[in-house]
Image (cartoon, rainbow, N blue to C red):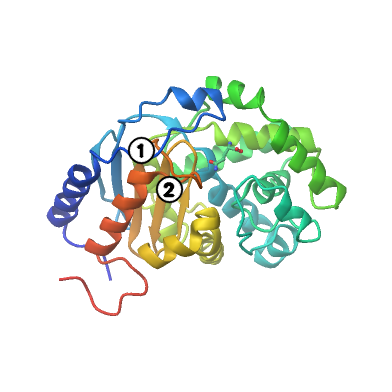
Amino acid sequence: GELPPPGRVRELLIEAHSRYGSVSDGNVADYIPALAAASPDLFGLAVAGVRGRTYVVGDHAVEFSIQSVSKPFVFALVCDVLGADEARKRIGVNNTGLPFNSVMAIELNDGSAMNPLVNAGAIATTSLVPGDTADEKWQFVLNGLSKFAGRPLSMAADVYASEAANNKRNQGIARLLESYGRLYFDPLEATDVYTKQCSIDVTVTDLAVMGATLADGGVNPVTGERVVRADTCKRVLAVLATAGLYERSGEWMYDIGLPGKSGVSGGIITIAPGKGGVATYSPPLDEAGNSVRGQLASKFLSDLLGLNLFASAPVV
Ligand code: GLN
């Protein structure tokens, strides 16, 4: 299967944008002060196919910090180096059923970070990034995510400074993991690299290409460069399906039927294996920290582009 013809994809993107552009539910995240400055009106959508075509509508060129959408890509880089079994052993691959920054999830599970898509597992993942120093790890992450996007990415210094100054909870999570022998680098340094990784600036178009790289077995369909192995992508998509939308992952799968990942700046990626990536950007979030308009547009596009993995008949 493939994406529908280009004219149809374009038409559906425009339709999704006009349908949900006026939805005003949700609140822009403010627990990281710099994020609160984002306009709630921003709304951009993008699709990237595994043949290398990209489609965009709305605020597709606006840069925003990637936040938790970085997590699957850093996990992919680490999984590719460690191997899927070692990554599972050290980080975990099960849903927590609890919020993304839960400390309780660690305590309830014998010190396990649980999965790479919640903060605990993401900090553990970042602690496993190749490199002897924090700076080497950071360069590896920035370079790896740039390959996924197909262009050199950089960090939003203001967002980084803002979160770095308000980071006690993530530092606490890192220390707790360390106490259980589940962190693999200095806790403050690992948290700092994780915070930088969350502050990488992207556009919704970048996110669609990054998603399409996972959909394409690890080859960026725009640049043609192999970023990670196909086996790695299969594993990353499995964890995304289980835990990409935190404690709402079941509802997401029920509605959308595809692996996805959200972040508190308002981005969501959805991956249709073998077909492409869908990305949405709209800052207002629901109580779980998932973009309200993004979820609506993702569902619409999953249905009308015929992407739901569990649908037995093509959409007509
Ligand atoms: N940097 C954010 C944090 O660690 C990312 C959270 C998210 O996007 N869910 O709190």
Q: SS at mark 2?
A: helix
Question: At x 29% / y 80%, what residue is drawn?
Answer: 312
Asked if 303 appears above or below 118 in the picture, the reply is below
Name the disc covering residue 282, or none: 1
Foreground: disc 1 or disc 2: 1
Q: Position of residue 291 (x, y in %)?
A: 40, 44
Graded by Cα atoms within 10 Å as few (under 14), some (14 to 19) or many (20 or more), the crowding at tag 2 reads many
Total numbered badges shown on the rendered structure? 2
Location of residue 9 (image quadrant): bottom left
Residue 246 at what x, y percent from top left?
Answer: 54, 54
Residue 228 appearing in the image: no
**What is the secondary structure assignment of the residue under circle 1?**
loop
Q: Which quadrant does the N terminus fall into?
A: bottom left
Looking at the image, residue 227 sits to the left or right of residue 104; the answer is left
- Cα–Cα gap, marks 1 and 2: 18 Å
Residue drawn at 69 percent across, 45 percent down: 129
Q: Amino acid at mark 2?
A: Met
Please name the amino acid that badge 1 sits on: Ser
The reply to whether residue 4 is visible in this rendering is yes
